[in-house]
Amino acid sequence: MRLKNSFFILLTVFLIYSCDKKRVFDEYKTVGSAWHKDSIITFDLPVLDSTKRYNVFINLRDNNNYQYNNLFLIVSMEKPNGYTKVDTLEYQMANPDGTLLGDGFTDIKESKLFYKENVKFKGKYKVQIKQAVRETGKVPGVTHLEGITDVGLRIEKIE
């Protein structure tokens, strides 16, 4: 019986990973109950095949404590030569009625957000993500952004 259970667990893990053939990197980091404005999430990317092209996504997990319609992120990608490209990105996180966008059946939603398309990587890269949400009419950023629980980065090969 024990051998049979082990076989089914191994088969399930194999099927989950084999169904996702495009994924070459997929990692999440938790930000706790609130994402502090000075907290920078860093991903050290593995060396990828420089002859292939990839799409890069920012993945977010959020819950009903997220009270904004959109999300602003400052994302930097450092190349092996030290050159860093910084992008300020805006993503819609909720419908006009306030319901969160994303996948999930509970109050936790997962959003897969496009960051870069058709990218070639040559060497080791580093990606850093920082939240930059501001309330309407206010200059200082939101110090503790509640509702975002995890920040992830996903890279998929283009076939």
Image (cartoon, helix red, strand yellow):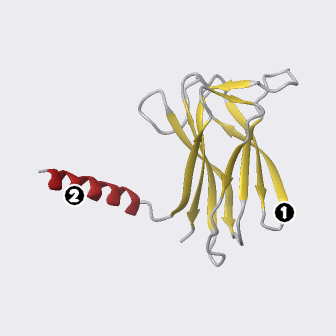
Query: Which residue is most to the left?
Result: 1
Pick the residue in front: 35 or 65.
35
Q: Residue at x 43, y 29 (%)?
A: 106
Q: How many numbered marks appear?
A: 2
**Amino acid type at image mark 2:** Phe
Q: Secondary structure at mark 1?
A: loop
Residue 79: x and y in percent read: 78, 63
Residue 23: x and y in percent read: 51, 61
Asked if residue 13 lies left or right of residue 140, the reply is: left
Query: Which residue is most to the bottom?
Result: 51
Q: Residue at x 62, y 61 (%)?
A: 55
Q: Quadrant of residue 92?
A: top right
* Relative height, residue 43 to residue 122 (above, below): above
Q: Residues within 10 Å of mark 1 (few under 14, many from 20)?
A: few
Q: Residue at x 27, y 58 (%)?
A: 11
Separation (CA) of disc 2 from disc 1:
47 Å
Pick the residue in front: 79 or 58.
79
Residue 88: x and y in percent read: 80, 44
Q: Residues within 10 Å of mark 2 (few under 14, many from 20)?
A: few
Query: Which residue is most to the right?
Result: 139
* Relative height, residue 73 to residue 141 (above, below): below
Query: Which residue is most to the front?
Result: 2
Residue 7, which numbered label?
Answer: 2
**Amino acid type at image mark 1:** Gly
Q: Earlier in the sequence, mark 2 or mark 1?
A: 2
Pick the residue in front: 21 or 79.
79
Q: Secondary structure at mark 2?
A: helix
Q: Which residue is mark 1?
A: 82
Q: Quadrant of residue 6?
A: bottom left
Q: Residue at x 62, y 52 (%)?
A: 57
Q: Quadrant of residue 26?
A: bottom right
